[in-house]
Amino acid sequence: MAENVLSVRNLRVEIPLRHGILCPVDGVSFDIPSGNILGVVGESGAGKSMTGNAVIGLLDRPAHITDGEIWLNGKRIDNLPKEAMRRLRGKEIGMVFQDPLTSLNPLLTIGDQLRETILTHLPVTKAEAAARAIAALEEVGIPAAAHRINSYPHEFSGGMRQRVVIALALCAEPSLVIADEPTTALDVSVQAQIIALLKRLCRERGTAIMLVTHDMGVIAETADSVAVMYAGRLAEFGSVRQVLSQPEHPYTKGLMASTPLAAKGKKRLNQIPGAMPRLDKLPQGCAFHPRCPVTEARCTTDPGPTLENCGGRTACWLTTKGAP
């Protein structure tokens, strides 16, 4: 597994409650090689962010990992003590959150936050940390970085704040970055800039990126491979070209048919009927079957095959590889 920066195997996350156990992540497996971007896509509640939080060790109690393994650069990390995991975050794994304003401390300057991160994770002097902080801002495209480093978060626009968050995630030179909806709160032109920035940094640094999003357009522009999640499980996995041009799982087909490009020339967008089921009210059988246009009898009673049973591409009885 050492050739992959990140390897996740059969990851399961459970949330114990008074009336039962919820499972927001159920048997998820994937790899991200160096210099590659994996897009994790699905509706709200699919388990995308929960998977990312499990990888970086930021699950909110009582959620916890109950099964599976997480390997980073050939070293297993899901069983590390809290202090060891804390040292790993920032140094080996960077995190870009959805809302850049809440990701930054409003009482500290951008420079203070960058220098603190660098000094915490790298063996450098204060002068070297200051120089690295300015270089990090320049790398992500902040103009007049030597001057703006003394500014506070509220003095930056939304797009510039997101660039600062990316600089914070990268300043300790991690091998993996988890970006959770990094473009959702930004306008279209700024989205394109952030996407281009992530791709460039990935290419130049060899960083592996796990990009969590619900936007198929962002996936198409950014990712090398894509994992489609539904109700905590992987529905489909493959290269971006494979999954977007020839989707196999009925859910993936529904997502692609719901995009504006697919509905070009039509008065209304296509949509998948219904909504993602609640974790405490998952239907018997395949979780997608109440919304699926091609449901068979066994889909209502059997949860369906895993990706491993289907050659690693599509977890569905109705695909050729998933057929018994």
Image: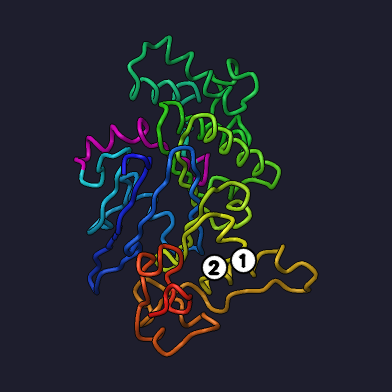
Above-or-below relation of 138 to 77 = above
Asked if residue 89 is among those painted magenta in the image, a careful observer would answer yes
Tell me where residue 72 sits by quadrant.
top left
Above-or-below relation of 119 to 157 = above
In the picture as drawn, the residue positioned furthest to the bottom comes out as 297
Identify which residue is drawn at 55% across, 61% down. 243
Q: Nearer the viewer, residue 16 or 205?
A: 205
Question: Which range of residues does the magenta coloring cover?
Answer: 80-101
The amino acid type found where label 2 is placed reads Thr
Crowding at mark 1 (Cα within 10 Å: few <14, some 14-19, many 20+): many
Crowding at mark 2 (Cα within 10 Å: few <14, some 14-19, many 20+): many
Q: Which mark is residue 256?
A: 1
Residue 150 point in image, percent of width and height? 54, 19
Tell me where residue 317 sits by quadrant.
bottom left
For disc 2, the marked residue is 252
Residues under numbered marks 2 and 1 in contact, where contact means CB atoms less than 8 Å apart: yes
